[in-house]
Amino acid sequence: MVKILRIALPVVVVVGIVFFLIRFTPGKKGALEIDAIPGAVVYINGEKMGQTPYQDESVFPGDLDLRLEPQGIVGAIAWERRLTITPNTRVVIRKQFAASSDEEFSQILYWEKTGAKKKAGLVLTSVPGGVSVSVDDQMRGFAPVNLEDIGSGEHKLVLTHPGYKSEEILVRTLTDYRLVVEVKLAASGEIAREVEEEAQVEEAVVKILIKDTPTGWLRVRDKASTAGGEVGRVEPGEEYELLDEDNGWYKIEYEQGEQGWISGQYATK
């Protein structure tokens, strides 16, 4: 028996939905399906075989070296992988290229015969590791996961990880076989942007500490000068965000919505 999957590639991969449909073909050879975004030239064992989408229903069992050379993306590099083709099974590959390898997505699916006549298994590995795996809207753990029996039929897999684009996959499993799913998620860049923004905010915030004064308090004036009128008072040990600086005077918000100047003689950054 041979299992076949059909892939539908989304135009925008935020949550990708892929459909895999198994059918059976005669003979003892295997099958190979490859799709890519954008298109790619397919090389097998160093020989140019055509372009994606690529499909071969009669592949001799054994190891083969696959190389995909992307087209249409500046900076994208070729993707290589050694595959093992077994009789009566199908290998399905889905690859999304990008200018940065961190933003690339890939998916490899194939079946392994288990001999468990009443069980339909699932093995899922991921890059990065620790991807959250949900099967049919039920949390089943973090990759790598090895589920001995999820039941034959269609199942929905949802893969999520902080800082990476989520993926949703619809698959069909069979008793007597284990479906193996190898996934590389594409980085979303959200965490990196958040860290960068937080660093910028922290770098921009400078605080002023009020030091001890002879009077036990410090005047806040309406301008950066001893000639400025008193608009408030602050006490030693208190901290305020530095808003501006002028010739040894610091501008602070001493009360909500109220700003003024204090002498740098009795304050420190």
Image: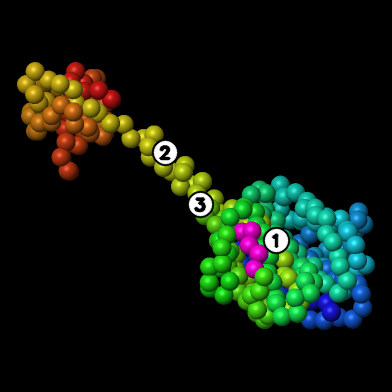
Query: Residue 140, can we see it?
Result: yes
Is residue 215 shown in magenta? no
Q: How far apart, in angstroms, are the residues tagged by discs 2 and 1? A: 37 Å
Q: Residue 126's image quarter?
A: bottom right
Q: Earlier in the sequence, mark 3 or mark 2?
A: 3
Q: Classify 132 as above or below 210.
A: below
The residue that mark 2 highlights is 200
The residue that mark 1 highlights is 182
Q: Is 88 left, or right, of 35 in this rendering?
A: right
Q: Is 98 left, or right, of 233 in this rendering?
A: right
Residue at x-position 9% and y-position 33% = 232
10 Å crowding of disc 2: few (<14), some (14-19), many (20+): few
Residue at x-position 63% and y-position 70% = 169
Q: Position of residue 27 (x, y in %)?
A: 92, 78
Do the residues bearing badges 2 and 1 touch, measured as CB atoms within 8 Å? no
Nearer the observer, 124 or 127: 124
Q: Position of residue 124 (x, y in %)?
A: 66, 63
The residue that mark 3 highlights is 190
Say what amino acid the circle numbered 2 marks.
Gln
Label 1's element?
strand
Say what amino acid the circle numbered 1 marks.
Glu
- For the N terminus, the image quarter is bottom right
Q: Earlier in the sequence, mark 2 or mark 1?
A: 1
